[in-house]
Image (cartoon, rainbow, N blue to C red):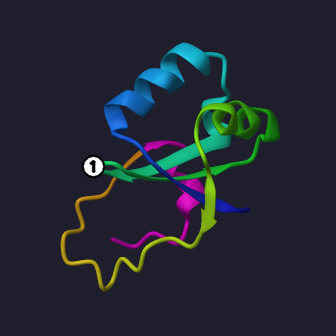
Amino acid sequence: METYKLTEIWNVFQKFLSTDLNHMNKKSIGFLYRDNEIYLRCTDENTLSIIRNKYALTPCKLPDFFLDKERDWLTSGNSRLFDLLQF
């Protein structure tokens, strides 16, 4: 499963999710966010397509949480999609 990064203020992105993706299967998508840094993983291509219509999704790796000094990460949706997280 691919990890994507996008840059947006979480509250703005969350509003987009509630208005444009209110039908989404919440088990199919997970978010890891801090300030305007959002990482997402999704198992549903239709949901990814809707998000791509509004936001540029950059394939990436997750940040190195062991070297991250701030560690102020929050999760939303299906956090089990980020099974590598040990923070």
Q: Is residue 34 magenta?
A: no
- Tell which of 83 and 3 is nearer to you: 3
Q: In this view, does 71 lie to the left or right of 44?
A: left
Where the N terminus falls, by quadrant?
Answer: bottom right
Q: Which amino acid does label 1 sit on?
A: Asp
Magenta-highlighted residues? 76-87
User: x%, y% of residue 18?
Assistant: 50, 18
Q: Examine the rendered structure and indicate whether residue 71 appears above or below residue 7.
A: below
The residue at 61%/32% (across/down) is 54
Q: Examine the rendered structure and indicate whether residue 43 appears above or below residue 73.
A: above
User: x%, y% of residue 48?
Assistant: 71, 40
Q: Does the magenta stretch include residue 78?
A: yes
- Tell which of 86 and 51 is nearer to you: 51
Q: Which residue lies furthest to the right in this view?
A: 45
Where, by quadrant of the figure, is residue 68 drawn? bottom left
Q: In this view, does 5 lie to the left or right of 15?
A: right
User: x%, y% of residue 42?
Assistant: 67, 47
On the image, numbered disc 1 is attached to which residue? 35
